[in-house]
Amino acid sequence: MSASPPTSEATVELPRPAGVVRRFWSGHPWLVDATLAGAYLIIGAFLAVLTPLSSGIWSPSVDIIVPLVGTIVGAVALLFRRHHPWAALAVFAALTIVSILVDVVPESLGGALAVYALFVYRSNRSGWIGFGILAIVAAVLAPLLDAMLRERTPFLLSPIGLVSLVVLLIAALLGITVGDRRRYIGAIVERANQLARERDQQARLATLAERARITREIHDVVAHSLSVMVSLADGAGALAEKDPQRSKNAIGEIGEVGRQSLTEMRQLLGALGDDPQSGDDASPLRPNPGLSELPALEATFRSAGLPVSMRTQGTPPSSQGLQNAIYRIVQEALTNALRYAREPHEVLVRLDFTGQEVVVEVTDDGRPGPAAASVGSGRGLIGIRERVRLYAGTVEAGRTDAGGWRLRVVIPQQIEQKEQQ
């Protein structure tokens, strides 16, 4: 029975975070960034105003305006740290240098958040590069610049620089932990999605293969039955006045062939549905025809006027699939002989199971002449080649020296042995 194709491409989702709060924040990243930027803005503005006021400065000055503007710019940078972490890092590096120029103590929290974002949303390599840049700016460049502007002795490991390094290092370690876990889970989910896509593709391929198999079966049934029925109908019409009894028998054969074909068609089409036996006139399913049905097939073609004879050597294969393939190959070859052979005296079907190969050979001794116009769908030989290809066999088809037609199929016996195992 063919599998129904999947309606949509399957994907794998992350496990749902525990708790309502975690689920809410994980589903609203922009709100998380906005909350973080707002908290940074509030804390930075409070410190920017509180520090000068604690020193007794009550009027707006550079000591208040510069940190306040820097806090606003840093908050905007944090708002986009998830999508543009390098830009956020550049902003905080510039703010550190500006703070030194106006003789304001630089803050390290914003830079640490930018470094954390690089580790989490880019890579460990990018994070360490960003860490190195901010570490050089905060611990080396800022003290040197401060010493040059204010004629002080440069002190590279100042308390402020050391605190900045410690904060950046903590942010780096946290970023490595969270970023590696995030990338690991992402890789697992991507792999699972890939497996799900491959599963769906395999299901689609299996569906297409099953439909192709049913199409070949339907073609064989229709081509065989219609060819036999047309030949019987022509014979019945020719004998209607000369031999009414034989004409009546031919008409009876037409009905028998039609009923048998309808039964096979019902079974094939039933395989496409969920309930192949639904309906009042549905017949129970039976195995596909095998070698035991070849005598009945020979009798059918003989009744249609084709001089068929069969010769079998050796023990037939036990594989039902291989038997069905041989049956359909012989059926198609005899159908072509009935259609195109020119007044053959014998159509010989030879089945050889004695050697290491299964040999199926169908030869007719029809008269030579130009090729007859095709009355089929052109899929006969194609279907035979497709069947034989499944068993790693070979097909040879063409005219004989005497003018008839010969079809030879060779299938390795080990294929049949593998199926038994």
Image (cartoon, grey):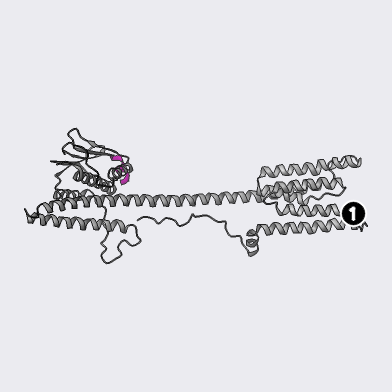
Most common SS among magenta residues: helix
Q: 3 or 301, which lies in front?
A: 301
Residue 161, visible in the rendered structure? no
Q: Which residue, as the protein is rendered here, is positioned at the far right? A: 56
Q: Which residue, as the protein is rendered here, is positioned at the far left? A: 242
Residue under the image location 14 percent in, 47 percent down? 305
Q: Secondary structure at mark 1?
A: loop
Residue under the image location 17 percent in, 55 percent down? 254
Q: 306 or 267, which lies in front?
A: 306
In the rendered picture of this protein, how many numbered marks are placed on residues? Answer: 1
Task: Give the image location of residue 416, x and y in percent.
Answer: 29, 43
| Residue 184 vertical position relative to residue 353 in the rendered view, above or below | below
Is residue 21 left or right of 364 when viewed as pictured? right
Is residue 383 left or right of 55 when viewed as pictured? left
Q: Which residues are magenta?
A: 412-419
Task: Give the image location of residue 368, x and y in percent.
Answer: 17, 36
- Per the image, the residue denoted by label 1 is 61
Q: Please tell me whether residue 48 belongs to the stretch shown in magenta.
A: no
Q: 99 or 181, which lies in front?
A: 99
Task: Give the image location of residue 221, x and y in percent.
Answer: 25, 52
Task: Give the image location of residue 312, x and y in percent.
Answer: 18, 42
Residue under the image location 84 percent in, 55 percent down? 48
Is residue 39 left or right of 64 when viewed as pictured? left
> Which quadrant of the figure contains the N terminus?
bottom left
Residue type highlighted by circle 1: Ser
